[in-house]
Amino acid sequence: MADELVLRAQRFFNTTYSGYAGMPKLEENGRTSWAVMYALTRALQLEIGVSPQSNAFGPGTLSALKSKVPSINENTSPSANFTRIIQAALYCKGYDGGEIDGIYNGRVKDGVSKLKANMGVDSIYPGSSLEPKVVKALLTMDAYTTISGGSDSVRSIQQWMNSRYIGRADYFIIPCDGFYSRDVQKAQMLAIQYELGMADGTANGVFGPGTKAGIKSHPLSVGSSGTWVQLFSAAMIFNRRSGVSFTSSYTSGLASAVSSFQSFLKLDVNGTADFPTWASLLVSYGDDTRKGTAFDCADEVTADRAKALYAAGYRLGGRYLTNVPGTTLDKKIKPGELATMASAGIACFPIYQTFGDYKDYFSRPQGTSDAIAATDAALAHGFKKGTRIYFAIDYDNTDEEITANLIPHFKGINEGMAQAGGYFQVGIYATRNACSRVSEAGLSTASFVSNMSMGYSGNLGFPMPSDWAIDQIKTINVGSGSGLIEIDNDISSGRESGQKSYNPAPAKEDLDVAFDPIFDAELTKDIQTYFQSIGIPEEGPPDSWLPTGKTKHTTSYCVQFMLSWDSLFTSLARMLKMRKALIQTSAIWELRHFNITSIEDLSVPKVNDNFSDACVYDYHNDGVLPDWVTDWGNKLQSLDDCSTGIGQIFGRRAIKARNHAIDLGLLDEAKRDATKDSDVWAVWEKLHFNQSYNISTVPFMHILHAMEKGMARPSLTTSEANTEKLLQYYQGDTANAAEQAKLRMGMYRIIEDKYQSVFRKYL
């Protein structure tokens, strides 16, 4: 919502500084932002002679301000515009700045006094003057009152720290918003270093050797008192330990809370503030010299390495189910490796990770695909039913990204696990915050916490997840010579036992394998050429998932789409023991023939795929239209089901196919009732919006059709004649469908005969 006072601040900047080089043009929207604060910082630099101007209020700006005006008030302000900058910044911070008139009047003074009180520095900087460090803080987006979700207790500690340490050279005013953040964590470390007697310039906010040694010399127990107890109780509060208050006295109540914390983290339980406890409060990895009994690694655990690991006390190891496609890193479990580990007395827990290091990878469809691929890989390695697979999120995610990307991703993982037969449990590898939120949503059964990444915001100030199983703390080397191996040293809570015995390796079968990306362009050209030979041009109608005109359902687009989901197609084919080309042909043929005729050209609206989809959406949502429907309004018809999504599947038919798969033991999910609107909508919605769910339903449709027509279930040995019949029945039991199946067989033969059969033999 626009704020009139912020709007005035934006207009002041644009009017006053638009003619100066390096000054941005602010959007006049009445909303404060870093863009506004950066602009005001540049304006302030210009007014005090700092050149060139930049967004950063760094040492040069602070030094120039101290030199020119060490205390800013109505008598010392360098210029009227300088005062206007202060007034504008006060507006943006929510304080009264008077009018933006260049006068440091009573209203400005009251605003400054209130600001300093909220910062906790009013006793150090009394009065209504502005000191350089206060100006620096003023030109940030930091808040100085408790914001939504924040803790008043945390805010009081933030104010106390500002008050106690603001006189130190490298300590700057931290937010007083009730949240523990990266800036607060660094300030906390600086405070400890100051109390250890470190001089300005030596204290740096890093948990280094000097800080560790100093903390070891300051143990606390019942009866201790003073600033060190305040710092320790603050650390307990920052870590969200219940029943702890900010105090200078180490009471029996505090000792009890400490014992609970130590027990939870598998530390020695003694109720004292010893070094391991301090370390676990100050950095996510805690005391990184702790000896773990668990590990994870990217290298093969050979017999010599297993022997060295066991001798070093390790009994549980994490290994990767697959490699990342398109990379050279070879980290997946090797043939015979699990037996080697088991023989040495080491259990294994499986980890699944592909491109898990950026937010856009994570989505509900991708989660479904990952779960099916992970299940396929875990079964191939011999992991038994009930084993927990840890799905990795290997980047510093924000809370907003957890909501928008990671929660949907793990919903997809749970759906994919069910679609793959429900063999395995879901675990998560991620930051503390991501692990906790996914667990609290009921989407994982245990957490493998990436605490080694101490600087991740998702670890700062967040408590360990209540269901933590593995705590990753430091990369080390174990063994020597042929037994040397690099591992991540992990602490085990006992929640994860891993596996020491495995199912026999599956019998060698003629299963499909991943498509070799070297041949991407050649496959695209082959299918383009074939389609053109049967009258299907390269160009297609606009894409239904993107704004009209942005892209097209061209043949090349559809082939690339198929290749982008190759891992899912491969996993489905392998698990269901049918030909990948059969699944791909049905799905991609439908995608290429997507019909999005404009509404004005409709003579029979139901032939328009996008229009039919909109009618179904309208029927099940009481006339509420989705974003992808435009300008159709009263032209929509009552339609409770239609074919939708990539594979163009009806909701009711999908229910029947999936129920049949449940009966066959291929799916582990609750059956749906095709006569109930709510069930039809639940399945239709997934078919429409979740690409991997739709793709995963395609093979179940083939299995259903085979049963209905008295045919054998599609398999690795299904004849070409029966494959053609399956392709026909996917479209219907009509003469036209039979003719279309002959055309579809051309695409099938390209994928199967020229590519997949060769890959199965040589890859």
Image: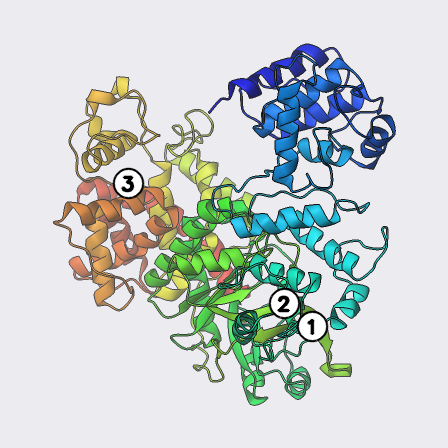
Q: Which residue is mark 2?
A: 280
Of 20 and 169, which appears nearest the observer? 169
Q: Earlier in the sequence, mark 2 or mark 3?
A: 2
Say which mark, if any, is on residue 644. Answer: 3
Gap in angstroms between the C-alphas marked 1 and 2? 9 Å
Residue 365 place in picture, x, y as percent: 41, 49
Drawn side of residue 358 relative to residue 184, left or right: left
Gap in angstroms between the C-alphas marked 2 and 3? 52 Å
Mark 2 vs mark 3, foreground winner is 2
Say which mark, if any, is on residue 662. Answer: none
Mark 3, residues whose alpha carbon is within 10 Å: few (<14), some, or many (≥20)?
many
Residue 166 place in picture, x, y as percent: 75, 45
* Circle 2: residue type: Ser
* Circle 3: residue type: Thr
Q: Which residue is mark 1?
A: 275
* Res. 709 in view: no
Residue 503 place in picture, x, y as percent: 43, 81
Drawn side of residue 182 relative to residue 464, left or right: right
The residue shown at (26%, 64%) is 713
